[in-house]
Amino acid sequence: MFLLFVSCTLLMAGCKKDPVEESKTGTFNDSRDQHLYKWVKIGTQTWMAENLAYLPAVSYSSDGSETTPFYYVYDYEGTSVVAAKTKPDYATYGVLYNWVAASTACPMGWHLPSDAEWSILTDYLTINGFGYGGSGNDISKSMGSAAGWTAFSLTGTIGNNQSTNNSSGFTAIPGGYRYYNKGFYDLGTYAEFWSSTQIGSTAWYRALYYNNDGATRKDFNRGYGFSVRCLKD
């Protein structure tokens, strides 16, 4: 049974929950390209535990749109899907999607989470003791992967003492982003994930930063290329 609260000793590294139970994790296969993904159950939700890597097409970072689907692989400037999939950044971080592409990219049985569904996740982690030190909304360390972030000196941030990260099993990785008109930025420092919820001409997303202790909620131009985490239907 999943334990909502775990007693621990407060150290300089903060309060770290026990590892996620094996019964709360698993894998599934995307029948479109046979890509195998890890998943994790957090509260009542089941999330992908790695970034979506579905790549039906790929574009230069200088090509994009707010209304037409576009797909990118960090630091790949070309149009060959085969070539893009050989890049180490594809294997590690998956694909960056503009909002329109992200809206339909998840495999059957999964979907792009709404802003409200992202809030269910962050509220669960906040309420159930996943904050740094065991309480509060400083939950970034519980969501971030235990390696791969730019180091940062401030305790409680995701880039500090990274081996204590990821008590939730969400395993967010800092895949950077595609700027809305061209270029790739902030690999190793930012993990940004689209939601399905629009706000006027923009859309909500959630972000984790190496130098921050919380999960940030913002809205941005839909032409940006962000990572995708799918949520089980």
Image (tube, helix red, strand yellow):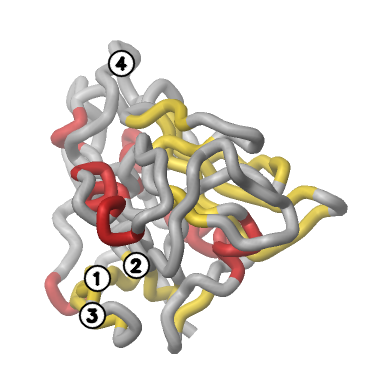
| Image-quadrant location for residue 35 | bottom left
Numbered circle sitting on residue 37: 1
Q: Distance of mark 2 from mark 3, alpha carbons?
A: 15 Å
Of tags 3 and 1, the one toward the viewer is: 3
Query: Label 1: how many residues lie within 10 Å, few (<14), some (14-19) or many (20+)?
Result: some
Q: Earlier in the sequence, mark 2 or mark 1?
A: 1
Of tags 2 and 1, the one toward the viewer is: 1
Of tags 2 and 3, the one toward the viewer is: 3
Q: Distance of mark 2 from mark 1, alpha carbons?
A: 7 Å
Which amino acid lies under the numbered mark 2 shown in the image of this protein?
Answer: Met
Whether 94 is drawn above or below 76: the answer is below
Residue 87 placed where, x, y %?
22, 46
Would you name the residue on which mark 4 appears? 152
Numbered circle sitting on residue 34: 3
Which amino acid lies under the numbered mark 4 shown in the image of this protein?
Answer: Phe
Would you name the residue on which mark 2 appears? 48
